[in-house]
Image (cartoon, helix red, strand yellow):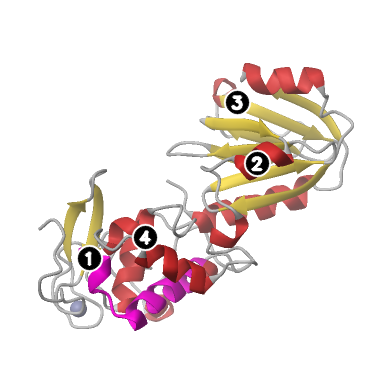
Amino acid sequence: MPEGDTIFRTARALGRALAGRPITGFRSTYPMLTRCHDDAPLTGQTVDRVEPRGKWLLMHFSGGATLVTHMLMNGSWHIYRPGQAWQRPRADMRILIETRDYHAVGFRVPVAEMHTAQSLARNSRIPQPQIDVLGESFDADEAVRRLLSHSEEAIADVLLDQCVLAGIGNVFKSEVCCVTGVHPYCKVSALTPAQARGLVAAARKLVSANVLEDSGDAIVTYGGRQRRTTHESDPGANLWVYGRAGQPCRRCGGPIAHRLQGLNARVTFWCPRCQPMPDDSDVDG
Ligand SMILES: [Zn+2]
């Protein structure tokens, strides 16, 4: 699933291609979107800006409407020049927004809703900007308070809660715990205040590092990548622990552990030596 950094880069690219240019065509396979377009045509309007919010992408139109999409596992936005061949089958197209210079195509985007400013503010699934770890108005103190309110849950599960920190997905979950030395199964109530603050700071820092202009497609949290000369194709080469089960910890050399965690059984990776469990704080074994 795309995490916050991917959505941020997608929004940035879409914004550069579309913003300020008149829309010349709009199509969708979703009846709800085409009905909105029939009622208040997007053609002739412009895209004011494209905003990432956690894992959600918000496209604001000059007429006041906002197209909100979520990629879940398989959705993606592509940008093409008019006439350029698409890299995905036509049948996968769900949304097409055309300007004179660029076409934006949403392929297999599973969640797509048209909102007004009012319905957007009321919607509890779409995070407000101050909850987004990449948001300019992100409030770290408030994020620590939200995190600590889940006192009986395991920290790794709480990091995935998009109402606590929007934009953290399964890869960053393990990486954030690793760089802060916190066991992913540690109960939130067992965290020290410094650990709670450190987790929030690490979440913002690691995701932010992946939206720099020169950051590539791979998620990078392990700073030693530049020193490596081999195994560059290893999907875990850029990461501290994610995807590295059984491989040596980059700090202590011990084997990286992994286990399915939480109600949704999401895989978690950690170093048992560098991320020790405080006494009596194990949530669910
Ligand atoms: Zn270790």
- Per the image, the residue denoted by label 1 is 187
Q: Is residue 203 visible?
A: no
Circle 1 packing at 10 Å, graded few (<14), some (14-19), many (20+), is: many
In this rendering, is residue 28 above or below 11?
A: above
Amino acid of disc 3: Arg
| Mark 4 lies on residue | 159
Q: Residue at x 23, y 45 (%)?
A: 265
Q: Position of residue 270 (x, y in %)?
A: 22, 67
- Judging depth in this view, the residue of 282 and 214 nearest the camera is 282
Are circles 2 and 3 on residues that touch, CB within 8 Å? no
Q: Nearer the viewer, mark 2 or mark 4?
A: 2
For label 2, the residue is 120
Q: Which mark is residue 94?
A: 3
Q: Which residue range is magenta in the image?
A: 184-207
Task: Judge depth for marks 4 and 3 and give the one in front.
Answer: 4
- At label 4, which amino acid type do we have? Leu
- Give the residue type that dot 2 points to: Leu
Image quarter for residue 178? bottom left
Residue in front for this viewpoint, 181 or 82: 181
Q: Check disc 2 and report its element: helix, strand or loop.
A: helix
Could you tell me how far apart the alpha carbons at marks 1 and 2 are, in whole angstroms? Answer: 33 Å
State the separation of the CA atoms marked 4 and 1.
12 Å
Mark sitting earlier along the chain (4/3): 3
Q: Residues within 10 Å of mark 3 (few under 14, many from 20)?
A: many
